[in-house]
Amino acid sequence: MTIPYRAGICRASMADLPALDRIEQASFDGDCVSRRSFRHFLTRGQALILVDRAHDGALRGYIALLFRARTSVARVYTIATDAAYRGMGVAAALVTAAEAEALARGCTRLRLEIRPDNQASQALFHACGYRVFGSYADYYEDGADALRLEKPLLT
């Protein structure tokens, strides 16, 4: 799936912390990224948070990527869209931007974990070319398993 890169996508800053936390807490019942973790991601070199802003500056959504030294695999740590902007292509545009950023950092694959009951996220990533390559048992805090997805970034 090819989504045009939105002009409103940029790197998150510390000023975005309240909105990141608000969207995260509203999007997930458990396993939420803490405000402290977001702060850590915003200040360390091995993480990147991209945000999509509306014309009025409101945060529509975000995606957090983690990078590890000496590996060509990047990881989507979390992605969420504000409820008011769901179904408008925000998440797909963020995934496309994240893939471009991972490639720019020399990564050739992007991976993530998804709950088997998160149909919306599965549909998004499958439409973007991600495929299930494994699973983790008892991955989430409530005991739910996780599907492991991956996409090669070079074709």
Image (spheres, helix red, strand yellow):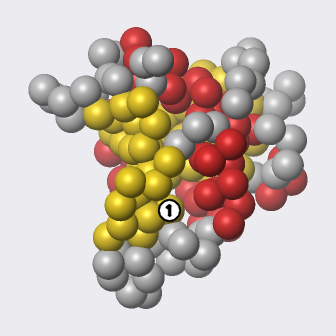
User: Based on the displayed image, in which of its 4 quarters is residue 68 positioned?
Assistant: top left
Q: Is residue 130 rendered to the left or right of residue 136?
A: right
Instruction: Give the x, y percent position of residue 65.
Output: 41, 38
Q: Is residue 130 rendered to the left or right of residue 71?
A: right
Q: What residue appears at the point 29 percent right and 34 percent down from the top-left corner? A: 73
In the rendered image of this protein, does residue 127 appear above or below residue 21? above
Residue annotated with mark 1: 114
- Report whether residue 8 is seen: no
Viewer-proximal residue, 25 or 88? Answer: 88
Q: What residue appears at the point 62 percent right and 47 percent down from the top-left corner? A: 126
Quadrant (top left/top right/bottom left/bottom right) for the N terminus: top right
Q: Is residue 155 rendered to the left or right of residue 22?
A: left
User: Based on the displayed image, in which of its 4 quarters is residue 129 positioned?
Assistant: top right
Instruction: Give the x, y percent position of residue 45.
Output: 27, 27
Q: Quick one: SS at disc 1?
A: strand
What is the three-letter code of the residue carrying label 1?
Ile
What is the count of numbered marks?
1
Viewer-proximal residue, 143 or 136? Answer: 136
Q: What residue appears at the point 44 percent right and 64 percent down from the top-left corner? A: 147
